């Protein structure tokens, strides 16, 4: 996921340019801190108090130069217009958020307005075309059959959430002026692994896993059945 985002940034902006990044639903701040360490100015928006506290604690442990490049704001991603002026950011991240938003079109339109011309909108969503894969690979045949005709599912936290279909999001991105430029699959081979599973301890095995996931995530038909989709839209692109 990080490699894919870095690839899009490197291909779109001059090397060394310090980008203005908005991370909507920043969670614990992992992505925000990574981008700040690379020299970018990052604003994180998060409404969950527990996540806000975790992000602020993580930021407090960073060197002063990195702390100065990160701003954390308590707020809802649907209220970006309250906090920021249109065109304020070069990159807007919305990773792992849309599944909790019942009607995401207004949220996405607001995020697109935050982008400067040529800016990158990066979305990470649950793949609504592959919901049957997880229960099917786990031997839950009733769950697999029920997943074919819906975009609703229960996540690993036990919450009722929703997934997004690639064709629908492609149309939505075109309609809000940030048409889809490229997309990737994420967690093609590793979706059934426990959430707390780390990389294999053996470096060669870990590198092989990452290489296989990366290759599958950009290769048809494998990326189409990934658990997650990473979509990249560009503001004002033809």
Image (cartoon, rainbow, N blue to C red):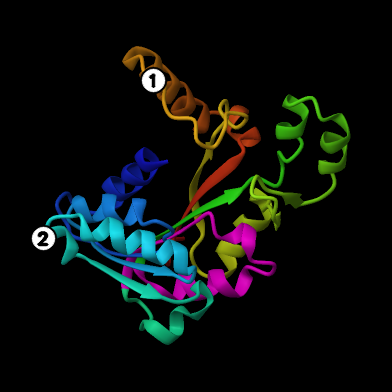
Q: Is residue 96 magenta?
A: yes
Which mark, by number, is residue 65? Answer: 2
Locate residue 227 relative to residue 143 in the image: left or right: left
Which residue occupies 48% across, 27% down?
A: 213
Which mark, by number, is residue 206? Answer: 1
Residue 223, compared with residue 149, is above or below; it is above
Specify the segment rendered in magenta. 89-117
Q: Is residue 198 magenta?
A: no
Task: Evaluate whether residue 233 shows in this view.
Answer: yes
Which mark, by number, is residue 141? Answer: none
* Whole-percent x, y for residue 28 in the image: 39, 56
Task: Evaluate whether residue 25 shows in this view.
Answer: no
- Dot 2: few (<14), some (14–19), or many (≥20) neighbours within 10 Å? few
Which residue occupies 33% across, 42% down?
A: 7
Locate residue 219 relative to residue 81 in the image: left or right: right
Q: Quadrant of residue 56?
A: bottom left
The local secondary structure at tag 2 comes to helix
Judging depth in this view, the residue of 124 and 157 nearest the camera is 157
């Amino acid at each position: 996921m990080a490699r894919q985002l870095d690839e899009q940034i490197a291909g779109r902006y001059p090397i060394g340019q310090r980008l203005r990044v908005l991370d909507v639903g920043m969670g614990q701040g992992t992505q925000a801190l990574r981008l700040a360490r690379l020299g970018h100015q990052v604003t994180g928006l998060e409404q969950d108090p527990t996540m806000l506290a975790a992000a602020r604690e993580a930021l407090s442990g960073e060197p002063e130069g990195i702390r100065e490049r990160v701003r954390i704001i308590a707020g809802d991603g649907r209220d970006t217009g309250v906090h920021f002026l249109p065109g304020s950011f070069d990159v807007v991240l919305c990773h792992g958020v849309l599944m909790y938003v019942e009607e995401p079109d207004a949220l996405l339109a607001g995020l697109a307005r935050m982008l400067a011309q040529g800016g990158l909108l990066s979305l990470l969503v649950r793949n609504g075309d592959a919901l049957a894969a997880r229960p099917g690979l786990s031997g839950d045949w009733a769950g697999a059959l029920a997943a074919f005709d819906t975009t609703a599912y229960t996540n690993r936290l036990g919450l009722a959430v929703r997934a997004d279909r690639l064709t629908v999001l492609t149309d939505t991105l075109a309609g809000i002026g940030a048409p889809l430029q490229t997309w990737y699959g994420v967690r093609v081979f590793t979706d059934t692994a426990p959430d707390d599973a780390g990389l294999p301890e053996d470096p060669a095995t870990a590198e092989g896993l990452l290489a296989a996931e990366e290759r599958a995530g950009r290769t048809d038909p494998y990326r189409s059945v990934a658990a997650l989709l990473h979509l990249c839209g560009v503001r004002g692109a033809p």
